[in-house]
Image (tube, rainbow, N blue to C red):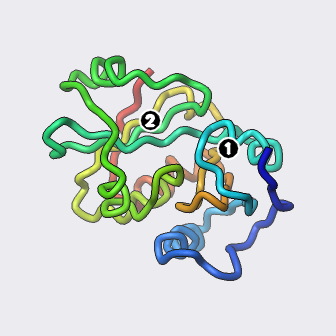
Amino acid sequence: MIKVSETKNTPPERFKTAFQEGVYNVLERLGIEFLRVDNEPAVTMEDCIAIDAALNVKTVKTLLLCNRQKTNFYLFITEGDKPFVTKDFSRKLEISRTSFAPAEMLGEMLGCEVGSTTVLTLHNDKNNKIQLVIDKAVLTYEYYGCTDSTTTSYMRIKTDDLINKYIPYSKHEAIIID
């Protein structure tokens, strides 16, 4: 099990990337309170077990997907313990089969690396090339658990703040699926 710090409600003293700093700047600008932990690198949902316990939250799974031509992109948020099946996702959106976007595109489009994908960098998608898709089950959570765009810091915010403050700020509209 990975090591996890005590919870904090302040940004890191030093930011690892400009994208991480941007996440905290946006949260402050929007008046979104958070609780966060620092941790050893967490890349898999199994790594998040100790993080979830420390934050008293269920970390979501966030995936950047694309079509074969790499012209349509989807940021999909679902429950961390729910298996992801591309065929089912594509069927629900009535689109051709999708796959995981290449790691370099994840960095270019959202400023994240594999294992640190988060909706909280969606404001970096200024041209709205990414369609946000949210599993309806995630909306039932009181708190939303995710990374801060790194693999070494996770946070929780109110799901209501995500839906009513952050997503409108990012200028994206979410498609909600079952």
Q: Quadrant of the N terminus?
A: top right
Q: Is 157 on the left or on the right of 112, as rendered?
A: right
Residue 125 lies, in percent from the top left, at 31, 61
- Lower position in the chain sequence, tag 2 or tag 1: 2
Q: At x 68% / y 73%, what residue is drawn?
A: 11
Question: What residue is disc 2 on?
Answer: 134
Going by the numbered disc 2, the residue's amino acid type is Ile
User: Residue 123 sits in which quadrant?
Assistant: bottom left
Name the residue nearer the viewer: 90 or 28: 90
Question: What residue is disc 1 on?
Answer: 143
Q: Quadrant of the C terminus?
A: top left
Residue 32 lies, in percent from the top left, at 62, 63
CA separation in Å, label 2 and label 1: 15 Å
Q: At x 73% / y 41%, what residue is drawn?
A: 57
Alpha-carbon neighbours of circle 2 within 10 Å: few (<14), some, or many (≥20)?
many
Going by the numbered disc 1, the residue's amino acid type is Tyr
Name the residue nearer the viewer: 40 or 119: 40
User: Residue 138 sits in which quadrant?
Assistant: top right
Q: At x 65% / y 35%, what residue is drawn?
A: 141
Q: Is 15 on the left or on the right of 126, as rendered?
A: right
Asked if residue 42 is positioned above or below residue 141 in the image, the reply reads: below
Residue 4 lies, in percent from the top left, at 80, 56
